[in-house]
Amino acid sequence: MTPTTQGSAVLRQGEPYDFDFIVIGSGFGGSVSALRLVDKGYRVAVMEMGRRWTPDNLPRTSWSIHRWFWRPGLALRGFFNMRFFRHVTILHGCAVGGGSITYACTLLRPPDKVWDNGYWAGLADWKAEMPQHYDTASRMLGVTENNILGPADLLLSRAAQESGVGDTFYRTHVSIFQSPEGEPRGQTFPDPYFGGEGPERTTCNACGGCMMGCRHGAKNTLDQNYLYLAEKRGATVYPETKVVDVRPLNGQPDGSDGYAVSTVKSTAMLNRRPRRFTCRAVVFSASSLGTTELLFRLKTKGSLPRISDRLGKHIRTNSESLIGVRVPGCAQDLSKGVAIGSGVYIDEHTHIEAVRYPAGSDTMSLWTTILTGGRPGPGRIALWLKNLWSSAVRHPVKTFRLFQPFGWARETIILLCMQALDAHIDMCWERPWFWPFRKFLVSRGDKVPTYIPQANEFAQKLARLAGGTAMSMLPEILFNIPGTAHCLGGCVIADSPDNGIVDFRHRVFGYKNMYICDGSVVAANLGVNPSLTITALTERAMSFISPAAEAINNPTGLSGSACITG
Ligand SMILES: Cc1cc2nc3c(=O)[nH]c(=O)nc-3n(C[C@H](O)[C@H](O)[C@H](O)COP(=O)(O)OP(=O)(O)OC[C@H]3O[C@@H](n4cnc5c(N)ncnc54)[C@H](O)[C@@H]3O)c2cc1C
């Protein structure tokens, strides 16, 4: 066993490792893992690349780019990131609490049929096992039905009625602390969720600011529940700490002697302060994109060469399309409510949610333009230019008001359209043609459709009702590239390394005491927002890990049974 090198503040007397478990990433997979492992008696560290946020340092609006957007090389140290690929633009979070800081906190259970599709089908009795984990996840995240319907939700409901699908309108389930209907908003209470062990919470004031991090303490972000409790019970969280290497210790290629985890300070431009920690076991929870990218890097440089060649396969996007309606000069403030207050099903496969940013957060307007249908390619771009031209000539003032950014959030309903169709792309680790000096993640495969005709039709109907103009995302029209906040897959659950990266208990094929718990393991298109499923899957994965007292010094390892992954 290797003696510890650095980061040894928590070393037990005579203990050969700095920590029992190192969890990489503090999002849904990482925070759940941290709490459950601490509860089982393990010494846990969580390495998180992003910063720690509190209501006091969160930005007021998205114009505060340096505190909203994450691009540390440009001194932008916020909690929201966008990554651009040939096939998709991926939106994701980066913070202590992972995507929960920026997410819209809508937590839905997918239909049972998702367990029948993809490589995970038949590997466990998912339909029987998952409900208890969804229940635990919902209780921990404080999921309730949204009781605040803002003007945007009411418009969505009217448009659904006009389209003959009014009966599918539903209020979302959200992880927000809400006051009972009719009672005053914005009141602070002692911990309402964990018998007094959790932090105090303030009821939602319907400002629509969930995606800017919630400056009022109403959104149940992970640093208010799972991660809060994990830290309180002994886990050590290292913010602004990016993991750059994970290697088996003592030349044991399967990691049975533990791992060395190397980190750098993610927000430092010059002195990156490299550190090295040792641990018995590792949980990768860096998100679908983050874990896939990190594992590609580690496989290629020889740190973890046994990772299956299926890495990066089956990245899914929920087949999302972001469209919207802007109503310049709207009498009502469409930003009021919760970030995603309601949804409708416009057909069997197509689900639309009403989304909003808080008043003043208008930067997203720079990505929106007049909705234009048609097959992707030059024809659609030509049609878009024609639409722009005719709008500018016929209604110059209206067109100006449509495109000037200020007031966008107050005047806009974003429509998040998701389809439960099984489209996917692959991520590869290659030198792109435009920068052949080093390898990057590059997307491959068939493009996920950006044009969902029935959703566009619905947006136009809603625009007519509201007296506004239907909008779509500029990259969708110009480059036929959809945007997604729900990137999943890349390290999917499967029966063998020939098909995926982890087994049905999230154990990495080829290694001992190495797990993946995040969106990357999801092996099917969920058709709904994924965080509740990631949380529930992680609860399930952690339930298989034996308590520390039983597992440490047990030759069968930490998973409670002989490792099948070695
Ligand atoms: C604007 C927006 C709105 C959304 N709204 C919803 C919603 O309403 N409902 C829903 O279900 N989902 C929503 N999502 C999606 C949701 O945020 C993600 O599905 C979820 O966070 C994924 O969980 P995860 O555990 O896989 O990873 P994440 O929560 O993304 O956490 C991964 C963490 O790992 C860290 N990390 C990455 N690489 C490293 C490294 N090398 N070293 C250290 N740390 C690292 C990252 O900084 C990040 O904090 C939204 C996303 C966005 C961007």
Image (cartoon, rainbow, N blue to C red):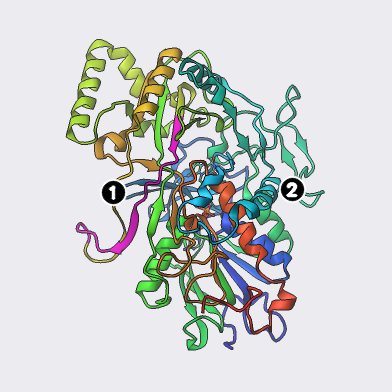
Tally of numbered discs: 2
Q: Which three-letter amino acid code belongs to the residue tagged 2?
A: Pro
Which quarter of the figure has residue 181?
A: top right
Q: Decide if residue 234 is in sight here.
A: no
| Mark 1 closeness class: few <14, some 14–19, many ≥20 residues within 10 Å | few
Residue at image position (69%, 60%) is 230
Which quarter of the figure has residue 299?
A: bottom left
Numbered circle sitting on residue 319:
none
Residue tagged 1: 446
Taking the magenta stretch, the answer to whether it contains residue 434 is yes
Q: What segment carries the magenta color? A: 415-435
N-terminal of the two: label 2 or label 1? Answer: 2
Could you say which is closer to the camera, residue 290 or residue 139?
Answer: 139
Q: Which three-letter amino acid code belongs to the residue tagged 1?
A: Asp
Identify the element where label 1 is drawn: loop
In this picture, is 331 found above or below 335? above
Residue 237 percent coordinates (x, y): 62, 63
In this picture, is 540 found above or below 7? above
| Mark 2 closeness class: few <14, some 14–19, many ≥20 residues within 10 Å | some
Residue 161 percent coordinates (x, y): 51, 17
Q: Decide if residue 120 is in sight here.
A: yes
Residue 153 percent coordinates (x, y): 55, 23
Q: Is residue 243 left or right of residue 5?
A: left
Could you say which is closer to the camera, residue 30 or residue 507?
Answer: 507
Residue tagged 2: 199
Residue 363 percent coordinates (x, y): 41, 34
Quadrant of the snapshot with the N terminus: bottom right
